Image: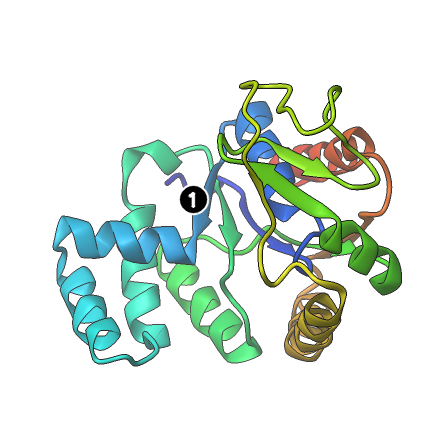
C-alpha cells in the first residue's frame, strides 16, 4: 500500500449504513474495505502465522488479542489489492487499539487520513434497523422504506423466503446503540484530538451521504 494512500475509518452504530457506503467507496475510488471478522477468517483459512495464532485462541473460546488483529492487519495491508487505500470496519474499537494502529501505520510511513463518524438520531435508527428484513438471495427490504413491488415476492429473484435478524428488534437495537456510544465516545475524542475526525449526517439520502464521503476522500487524497 502506497504511503500516501488513504486510510479511512468509518464510525457509526449498527444500521448507520457503514457497509453500504464502504461498498460505494470501493466502487468510486478503488479503496478496499477491511473488516476485522473477514480478515480473521481469511487468515485462519490461509494458515498464516497470525491466522494459526487466531485459530488457537478462537478454538479455546477466547477473544482474539489486539496484537493478533494488528498482525493480521499488517499482513493484509502488504497485499497488492489495497494499493489505492483502505477502509477499516470494526477496528479500532477503543482508543488503545487506535494508538496501536497509529504505531503500525507509522512504521510504514502511513497514518489515518480520516476518521468519519456517521452521525445518526438514535430513535430514528431504532425504526430504521428494526424494520429491516432480507430475501434468501440477500436483497434487503424495509417495512417502511423499501417494500417489494409485489407483497411477499422479492423484486430481484422472485423468491418468497424472507427473514429478519433476531437482534433487529427495538429493544436490542436500543441496547446496541447504548453500547456503541459508550465504546465510541473515546474514539471520537481521540481522532478529534488528532485533527482527522470528520462528521457526516447519516440520516439523509444514501446518495447525499455518498457525495459527502466522496468529497472527504478527494480532500484527503489530494
Res. 22 visible in picture: no
**Tally of marks:** 1
Q: Position of residue 7 (x, y in %)?
A: 52, 48
Q: Nearer the viewer, residue 142 or 30?
A: 142
Quadrant of the image for the C terminus?
top right
Q: Position of residue 213 (x, y in %)?
A: 72, 38
Picture quadrant where residue 172 is located? bottom right
Res. 194 visible in picture: yes
Q: Is residue 68 left or right of residue 185?
A: left
Question: Measured along the vertical axis of the image, is residue 28 above or below residue 17?
Answer: above
Question: Measured along the vertical axis of the image, is residue 64 above or below residue 3?
Answer: below
Q: Is residue 82 left or right of residue 148?
A: left
Q: Is residue 208 left or right of residue 109?
A: right
Q: Position of residue 49 (x, y in %)?
A: 13, 62
Q: Nearer the viewer, residue 163 or 182?
A: 163
Q: Nearer the viewer, residue 126 or 159?
A: 159
Quadrant of the image for the N terminus?
top left
The residue that appears at 51% across and 66% down in the rendered structure is 92
Residue identified by numbered label 1: 3
The residue that appears at 19% across and 61% down in the rendered structure is 51
The residue that appears at 28% across and 54% down in the rendered structure is 41
The colour scheme is rainbow
Q: Position of residue 221 (x, y in %)?
A: 60, 36
Q: Is residue 167 left or right of residue 84?
A: right
Q: Nearer the viewer, residue 168 or 198?
A: 168
Amino acid at each position: 500500500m502506497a504511503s500516501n494512500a488513504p486510510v479511512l475509518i468509518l464510525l457509526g452504530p449498527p444500521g448507520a449504513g457503514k457497509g453500504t457506503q464502504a461498498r460505494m467507496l470501493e466502487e468510486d475510488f478503488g479503496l478496499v474495505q477491511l473488516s476485522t471478522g473477514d480478515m480473521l477468517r481469511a487468515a485462519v483459512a490461509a494458515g498464516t502465522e497470525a491466522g494459526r495464532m487466531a485459530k488457537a485462541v478462537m478454538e479455546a473460546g477466547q477473544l482474539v488479542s489486539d496484537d493478533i488483529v494488528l498482525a493480521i492487519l499488517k499482513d493484509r495491508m502488504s497485499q497488492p489489492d489495497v494499493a489505492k487505500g483502505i477502509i477499516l470496519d470494526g477496528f479500532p474499537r477503543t482508543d488503545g487499539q487506535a494508538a496501536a494502529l497509529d504505531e503500525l501505520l507509522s512504521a510504514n510511513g502511513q497514518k489515518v487520513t480520516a476518521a468519519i463518524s456517521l452521525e445518526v438520531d438514535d430513535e430514528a435508527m431504532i425504526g430504521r434497523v428494526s424494520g429491516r428484513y432480507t430475501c434468501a438471495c440477500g436483497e434487503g427490504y424495509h417495512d417502511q422504506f423499501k417494500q417489494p413491488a409485489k407483497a411477499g415476492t422479492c423484486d430481484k429473484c422472485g423468491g418468497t423466503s424472507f427473514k429478519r435478524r433476531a437482534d433487529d428488534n427495538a429493544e436490542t437495537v436500543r441496547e446496541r446503540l447504548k453500547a456503541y456510544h459508550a465504546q465510541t465516545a473515546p474514539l471520537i475524542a481521540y481522532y478529534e484530538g488528532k485533527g482527522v475526525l470528520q462528521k457526516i449526517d447519516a440520516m439523509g439520502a444514501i446518495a447525499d451521504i455518498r457525495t459527502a464521503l466522496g468529497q472527504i476522500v478527494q480532500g484527503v487524497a489530494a
